[in-house]
Amino acid sequence: MAIQEFSRGLRIMITGANGQVGWELTRSLLPLGEVVALDRSQCDLSRPETLSNIVNEIKPNMIVNAAAYTSVDEAEKEETLANTINGTAVGVLADEARKQNALFVHYSTDYVFDGNKPTPYTEVDTPNPINAYGLSKLAGEKSLRQVNDEYLIFRTSWVYATRGNNFLRTIIRLSQEREELGIVADQAGVPTWARLISETTAYCIRQSMLERKQGTFSSDIYHLTATGQTSWFGFAKKIVELISPIVNEKSKLSVVKPIKTVEYPTPAKRPMNSCMTIDKLEQHFGLKMPKWDSALKLCLEDNCIDILSQ
């Protein structure tokens, strides 16, 4: 089926259009149909009572919810707000999607797990969040599944991009401000580029819409990350290594040293193991995801000058 035939009449509503993933989605989903990308000023998930009118006005065939409360530490102080945005509002949007017979696509997180498992988490492992952010994201998953049976949930991890507040941009900034950095080395996870998430989402959506048309679609949860694993220390070391030819004159950094979690206390407890298997995603959609460091290299090759100028 040609893309033109597939996309005819398809209207895709995206929330969180100015976020890391949302910004990439507005571009990745354009070939699939008409994209209506809404930022917080146009669609505020902290006000769930406004969402019904927004969806009814747009009448989408698909809602891709990339909006979220993402400040892990602040969520410890603003738990009610985090639950409203990541939990209650998700249920409202999912219910409105059901009324429109629209596919609902939602992003969750590795932080729904407690991090105590010694091996990567699968989709059938029981969630057990250890911080307010993880609890709010799990609430969103549950709210969605209670009201809608036409959905895709993608759990992502350690998301970075060339815009917004994220680990990549923080390390680049600090490398120009400090001579030494101490980075946590005993937490394991998979850094995942926002563009990889958006492009993979577009591919999965296209296949899922065809499955819906054929009557073979089945709603499910998938882990969507790059492959391999590292620590925050390993992530930082790789960033510094890749940007060094470009920022050499600006950089003050001479040492990146590993530290333990206990040496860097934060308001929110972090899972020690955030790694997730992606076999289910790759097998169902026929994908081969790239290694995390290869994706990081591509991100920086494409955008490093832009990041440094921001």
Image (cartoon, rainbow, N blue to C red):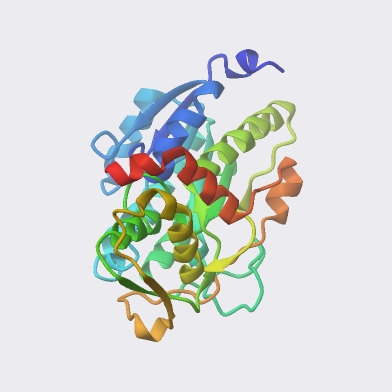
**How far from the left and from the top, in percent, is residue 108?**
49, 55
- Which residue is nearer to you in this view: 53 or 155? 155
> At 67% across and 56% down in the image, what residue appears?
278
Q: How many marks?
A: 0
**How far from the left and from the top, in percent, is residue 13?**
43, 30
Furthest residue toward front = 249
Furthest residue toward bottom = 262
- Which residue is nearer to you in this view: 86 or 57? 86
**How far from the left and from the top, in percent, is residue 195?**
50, 41
> At 54% across and 30% down in the image, what residue appears?
101
User: Which quadrant is the N terminus positioned in?
Assistant: top right
Instruction: Please give left or right for residue 196 compared with residue 266 in the image.
Output: right
Q: Is residue 305 visible?
A: yes
> At 46% across and 46% down in the image, what residue appears?
300
User: Which quadrant is the C terminus positioned in?
Assistant: top left
Q: In this picture, is 96 found above or below 178? A: above
> At 66% across and 64% down in the image, what residue appears?
122
Q: In this picture, is 235 found above or below 31? A: below
Instruction: Please give left or right for residue 87 compared with residue 97 in the image.
Output: left
- Which residue is nearer to you in this view: 121 or 306? 306
**How far from the left and from the top, in percent, is residue 279?**
72, 55
Q: Quadrant of residue 140?
A: bottom left
Q: Is residue 224 visible?
A: no
Q: In this picture, is 10 found above or below 168? A: above
